[in-house]
Image: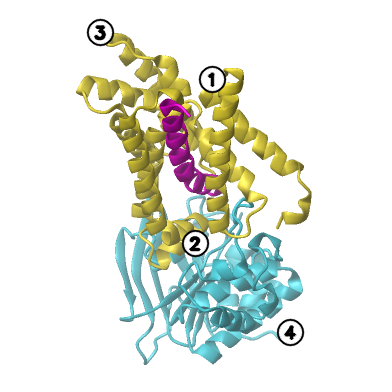
Amino acid sequence: MDDFLIRALSGGLGVALAAGPLGAFIVWRRMAYFGDTLAHSGLLGVALGIVLQVNPQLGVAAACLLIAIILVLLQRQRALAVDTLLGILAHTSLSLGLVTLAFLETVRIDLTGYLFGDILAISPDDLYWIWGGAGLALAALGWLWRPLLAATVHEELAQVEGVPVFAVRLAFMLLIAIVIAVAMKVVGILLITSLLIIPAATARRFARSPESMALLAGGLGCIAVGAGLWASLRWDTPAGPSVVVAATTLFALGHALPNRLQR
Amino acid sequence: MTVKPLSAPLSAPTLATSPVQPLLTVENVNFAIRGHPILQAVNLQVSAGEIVALIGPNGAGKSTLVRVVLGLIRPDSGHIRLKPGLRIGYMPQRLSIDDTLPLTVQRFITLGAPASRERVRAVLAEVGAPQVLDSPVQAISGGEFQRMLLARALLREPDLLVLDEPIQGVDLTGQYELYDLINNLRHQRGCGILMVSHELHLVMATTDHVLCLNRHVCCSGHPDHVASHPAYLELFGFDGARRLAIYHHHHNHRHDLHGAVVVAEEEEHG
């Protein structure tokens, strides 16, 4: 296998392993649109990274966190519903990112790569970021698991029982921001949510505990990455979208299976 | 049902004075959201082995008061005093668990604190639902669900149980059983219970102390006394009150749309 293929597969698997368990929480907490909004701000992060001359993935994580904090603050006013706020923030940050990039005329960037992923162009440097970020996210998720699960089921009950729910919620947002930053190279900011949500949704049918659903989601994500890459090489299709299509195919297959394994 | 004559209407608010140190004392608590008063000068006490019920119409601030007691909301003024080292078991209202979360009853109960399977089984047996131990939380009945919530609260060995509408979503027979269960808990465990309820009839039968809340404490005291109090009759209407075999008193005040007390003489009868 060529080096670039090994790097693509390795990076994809790293992202899938972290996105699966985190995606399970996004599904349980009904935060799909929230994750999508954070991902949209990724392009603004890329632009920031270029302006400040830091690694774009750091810029993306910072932009995601910034949008998450703005959202938390905006939620305190109750004039607008949350989904309206999310819609405003998602498209504003995406547009701001595009506008800012347009101002950086001296820099040539591959916009399609950022929007839809450029998994075949993953460099050894990117791999360090991906595995470092994914490993950090997974370790933190393991550490947060119990309080996060308690707060997911019922925030106030968890708080009465001693869980610092606000800190846990912030930490969870930070994890989402990290995973979005590292997943950008693989599927692009417009498709990241799918890698978080589709494997988790597929896993639900076969899981009997939160842990098994999270692990299964990670595994299914890996299969989707492998299958998507293979399909991309076989039929010369764009890699990021192929991974998403593979994930959705698994989802459809899972639902076509007999009900025997369902809860 | 018998009609109990009452010597004199109680003045509101009244507090039961207890010789032992109460588990919970709420002193003169005020809370407003953007200048809109939700709780006004609320006082409340719960002692060990005692059931205190909060009743009142929707929007009366019952759940807000519960959240203040639990420390989830900080009041604008006033004090919440808890007995040192007090352990609280909380049963929230209207909990729905997303279908996408695969969770058994055992896992749900131990989310609050780790416990052995045997302990979970024992506490489920105590609340009368040992059969659901390994069931998915989405597959149990409304009554079983409430018992599961109660079991999670009891697993903490609480000194004070705070129950927010514990019989919501439970069928009628189940409601009586659940009230009996709660009533027995304070005898068996000796814990104090603060309970929000809509079911006046059931509350009246098992409670020691009733607080009728409509942003301020309209009246409080023993259920028999409260049930014949004019403020109570004003809040719940004569028909509702009569079902509890209470006779009618003259109103001494009513409430305007903002919940403020209006002395009856100043207004035409509505």
The three-letter code of the residue at mark 3 reads: Thr
The one nearer the camera, A259 or A83, is: A259
Q: Disc 1 to disc 3, how far (Cα)? A: 27 Å
The mark closer to the camera, 4 or 2, is 2
Residue at left offset 61%, top offset 68%: B105
Instruction: Judge whether residue A123 can be spotted in this image.
Output: yes
Q: Which residue is mark 2?
A: B63
Q: How many residues crowd around disc 2 within 10 Å: few (fewer than 14), some, or many (20 or more)?
A: many
**Label 1 close to label 4 by CB (< 8 Å):** no
Q: Does label 2 lie on the same chain as label 3?
A: no
The three-letter code of the residue at mark 2 reads: Ser
Q: Quadrant of residue A75?
A: top left
Instruction: Chain letter for cyan, please.
Output: B
User: x and y percent of residue A240 in the render?
Assistant: 51, 26
The mark closer to the camera, 4 or 3, is 3
**Label 4 close to label 3 by CB (< 8 Å):** no
Q: Residues in magenta?
A: A1-29
The three-letter code of the residue at mark 1 reads: Pro
The one nearer the camera, B91 or A208, is: A208
Task: Say whether residue B61 is left or right of residue B95.
Answer: left
Q: Which residue is mark 4?
A: B1
**Label 4 close to label 2 by CB (< 8 Å):** no
